[in-house]
Amino acid sequence: FDQDDVLYCNTAYGDYPTYLPRKDADHVKGLFTGWMLLNYNKPVQVSSTLGGYQPNFAVDEDIKTYWSAKTGDKGEWFQTDLGEMSTIHAIQINYADQDAEFLGKQTNTYHQYKILISEDGTNWKNLVDKSNNKTDVPHDYLELTQPAKGRYLKMENIHMPTGQFALSGFRVFGKGSGKK
């Protein structure tokens, strides 16, 4: 509420990472981290594509579109090029339900994957390893404990609960090398 007891809501960057609210926070300035979406409509490469579910749909910020691999098998992958060396603070993964065989919440489903990072698109290092994950994460948000520098990110599928490896959003947040 503002000084006149009118409800105030700052919705700028509403679907970007924010700091958790604190009692002493300046809510007029907001809780925005300053991390920008680094891969909106940036080039992508994939292991395979199912029909018209094109690779760039995973970075177009349109919830109605998504990319799908031909299978849900281990080894299918998705790669995005940030266009320049960047500092990465967080990654959000939104899976799509391509050819899913069940609806609603299931208790025995899980996603497993790895995310790799590279400066040149050839030499890769592990960034995130969820190869032993046993929880359902259809909308996984990963805030890195230490920011990472790189230009390319690759997500390698290890296990899908059902259907194809499909992404409606692969969102990379951080800071590019440009001026503020």
Image (cartoon, rainbow, N blue to C red):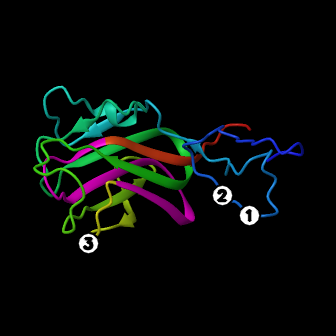
Separation of marks 1 and 3 at Cα, in angstroms? 32 Å
Residue 97's place in the image compared with 64, above or below, is: below
Query: Closer to us: mark 1 or mark 2?
Result: 1
Quadrant containing the C terminus in the rendered view: top right
Q: Name the residue carrying label 3.
A: 134
What kind of residue is marked 2? Tyr
Residue 153 among magenta residues:
yes
Q: Earlier in the sequence, mark 1 or mark 3?
A: 1
Residue 159's place in the image compared with 54, above or below, is: below
Query: Closer to us: mark 1 or mark 3?
Result: 1
Q: Position of residue 74 (x, y in %)?
A: 15, 58
Q: Earlier in the sequence, mark 3 or mark 2?
A: 2
Q: Secondary structure at mark 2?
A: loop
What kind of residue is marked 1? Arg
Q: Position of residue 173 (x, y in %)?
A: 54, 48
Q: Residue at x 13, y 28 (%)?
A: 51
Q: Name the residue carrying label 1.
A: 22
Q: Name the residue carrying label 2.
A: 19
Q: Secondary structure at mark 3?
A: loop
Q: 49 left or right of 6?
A: left
Q: Residue at x 41, y 55 (%)?
A: 117
Q: Position of residue 170 (x, y in %)?
A: 39, 44
The reply to whether dot 1 and dot 2 touch (C-beta < 8 Å) is yes
Residue 63's place in the image compared with 89, above or below, is: above
Q: Secondary structure at mark 1?
A: loop
